[in-house]
Amino acid sequence: MSHQQFSRLLPYTCEHLFDLVLAIERYPEFVPGYSQARILRREAGALEVEQSIGLGPASFSFRSRAEFIASEQIFICAHDGPFRRLEVRWQFAAQQEGGCRVTVDTHYQPGHLLAAPLLRGAMELLGPRLLDAFVQRAAQMA
């Protein structure tokens, strides 16, 4: 299983950053590679989401479940589409000196052997840009 982790201390409240990440249906507006994100069902503490991502000629659609604890953590998992397994954990930690430390931790395993190299390449390109996209969006929304 492949793994990526990125972390930044940002000059925003954890509530603001949490809300930004949980607004999954807005991802196509600013997250590289996202062409569609639609919330299928809302429950207390969870969302069911259908998403499409792509890079160049390759595009993938999948469903995921996002479970959350307000202003602290969002855990996203998927087991369909191009993934045998996808887990993304966002953590938001208020800092004594101000601001919020945001950490995004991604684990993924391709589901199809033929698509594995393409998916791995897309994730390696998109992964590092993911947190950057949220940092830029937070600055625009502040």
Image (spheres, rainbow, N blue to C red):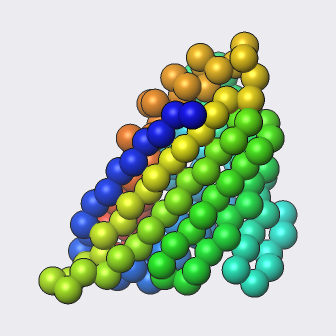
Q: Residue furthest front?
A: 1
Q: Position of residue 51 (x, y in %)?
A: 72, 48
Left or right of residue 95: residue 83:
right
Farthest left residue in view = 97
Can residue 88 be seen here? The reply is yes
Say which residue appears at 75% left-offset and 84% top-offset: 44
141 to the left or right of 41: left
Question: x%, y% of residue 130?
Answer: 44, 48
Q: Quadrant of the C terminus?
A: bottom left
Which quarter of the figure has residue 117?
top right
Q: Residue at x 30, y 70 (%)?
A: 101
Q: Position of residue 136 (x, y in %)?
A: 35, 58
Position of 110 relative to 19 (above/below): above
> Is the residue 119 above or below the residue 70 in the image?
above
Res. 52 visible in picture: no
Q: Please state which of residues 136 and 71 is positioned toward the viewer in this rendering.
A: 71
Q: Is residue 10 left or right of residue 28?
A: left
Snapshot quadrant of residue 13: bottom left
Residue at the image point whose x is 39% and y is 79% from the top = 14
